[in-house]
Image (tube, rainbow, N blue to C red):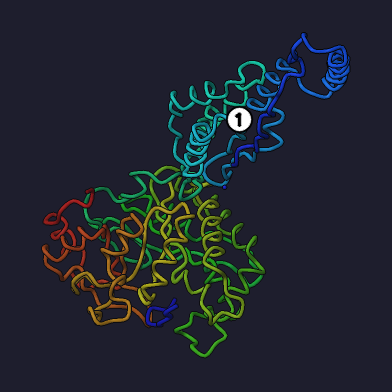
Amino acid sequence: MRRSANLPQADRDLPRRPHAMHTSPFARPDLSASTAGTAAWLIALLLSACSSTSNTSPDQTSATSATQQSPTAGTIAANTTPSKPSAQAGGAAARSGSPPPAAGSAARDVQQAGASAAMSGAAGSTAPATATTTATTTATAGTTASAGASGSAGVSGNTAGQAGAPATAATSCGGASNTAAAQPFGCKFAWGTNDPGGSLAAFAGLSFMSKWVGYEIDMSGNLPRCDGCSWLKEQVGSTQLVPVYYAYFVGYFGKANGLPDGNENPNGPNLTTDAAKLIRAQKPKLISLYRDYAKQTAQAWPDKPIVWLLEGDFVQYTSDTQKEPLTLDELAGLGQDIACAIKSEMPNAVVAINHSTWNSDELTNNFWNAMNKVSYDLVWTTGVANNNGFFEKDADASKYNAKTANYAYVHQLTGRNIFVDTSFGISEMADSWSSADPATLNARIKEGVIAANVTKPPEGYVAKATTLQAKLNPVCQ
């Protein structure tokens, strides 16, 4: 794992024909006229009678006018384009009938209100009764034109609104996140260290004990044994300690195939150059490894909480230093697959995603927004206690990532509590936690920190941790 790298990264009304100007052909002339006049009158009368067949009677005119004013529902459907709410917005969108032209804007407003509600994903508000009534009343074609059916667009719009449902940030799997998951160590600030090997009796005053797992994987992706399982049964089982796994399966699989951590072999090949390519080629194998390990662990630790700290520097698999980098969405998909593989076998598992403290402000925001798709419970990271809430000991307001490289920001951004360690190997930090005063630690608690894993504890660490714990604010806020 790297701890020092810097990788900044629209309806129209139907046209109306004008009403015809009708003149009656039966206007009587004066009967006192001459015979010639009479004959002319008779001829005119006959001609008028003949020509009347090409004109429309008043009754016919009324019918025609009524039909033009109130076309049938079929005519409406052929001339009006209904609004179609998007189905992506929060459930299936109902198909609404088009309002009749005479209903005009009242019915369209109702329809659009329903569509808007559906697209917002919220429960659609009931379409105003007055609007629906207006649509039916205005379409005065009445029953002849079936205006009632077409005028029901307002009701359909309301149905579409009610179909909406808010989207969830992540698809849950196995043991969904809950209060127990957010506080696996209870309401006291938790102190712990990494497994020293052998009996854990001397660490009974601590809250948890951590152990690396996944190193058992060979280069072919086989898992010959589960050392974490035997550790749980033989060492942890007789204590009140909460077990914590550093689950580094991708990392260890990479190492088995000649890919060390980036800080171990900076010039490559390493996990920062070839791990994403390995993930693409072996993703089903990696997920099955997590599932198998969780299944075996559940047999050894079936009920009580166990924390899985997933893949340190998880974001590194999206870096442009990778030959075939993952996108953040692909990384989130991997994270979700891993979390579900674990939780489907261990409902008592608490899953944590790692925050790399060298992330730029932009990368931090983009990374954690992508992780909203993952069913995780905690954030874990590396940092100090005594630098005004910054992760790194030499960080300050002038640094490139000062806005986001602190406990308070990540806690607020993710909505998760934070597990902090002092790292390992080359990037290991000195203990600044058990040497801090209660006021400093309470400030970190306020920023979301609930646990400190001092991986290389100083002399008298257990006693110091026990004394401090009694003086600190509860982490259940």
Horizontally, is 414 left or right of 463 in the view?
Answer: right
Q: Residue furthest top?
A: 32
Place residue 51 in its image quadrant: top right
Which residue appears at 44% of the width and 39% of the height? 122
Return the residue found at the far front.
34
* Identity of the residue drawn at 55% across and 40% down: 91
Task: Please identify the quadrant where the N terminus is shown.
Answer: bottom left
Above or below — where is 331 with respect to 17?
below
User: Is residue 92 positioned above or below 19 on the image?
Assistant: below
**From where the camera sits, is residue 299 visible?**
no
Q: How many marks?
A: 1
Q: As rendered, which of 434 and 462 lies closer to the eye?
A: 434
Q: Position of residue 313 (x, y in %)?
A: 44, 72
Nearer to us in this view, 56 or 98? 56
Q: Is residue 196 left or right of residue 131?
A: left
According to the picture, the residue beneath numbered tag 1 turns out to be 100
> Residue 95: horizontal and vertical position, in percent?
62, 35
Is residue 235 something that shows in the picture?
yes
Q: Is residue 247 above or below residue 321?
A: above
Foreground of the two, 374 or 268? 374
Q: Residue at x 77, y 9 (%)?
A: 31
Front residue of this view, candidates 422 and 139: 139
Could you tell me residue 174's position as x and y percent? 50, 44
Q: Quick check: 30 left or right of 347?
A: right
Q: Residue at x 47, y 48 (%)?
A: 300
| Quarter of the view holding residue 334 | bottom right
Q: Find residue 318 and report its horizontal and vertical position in percent.
A: 52, 73
Is disc 1 surrounded by few (<14), some (14 to 19) or many (20+) residues within 10 Å?
many
Judged from the image, the secondary structure of the residue bearing numbered disc 1 is loop
Query: Which amino acid, mark 1?
Result: Pro
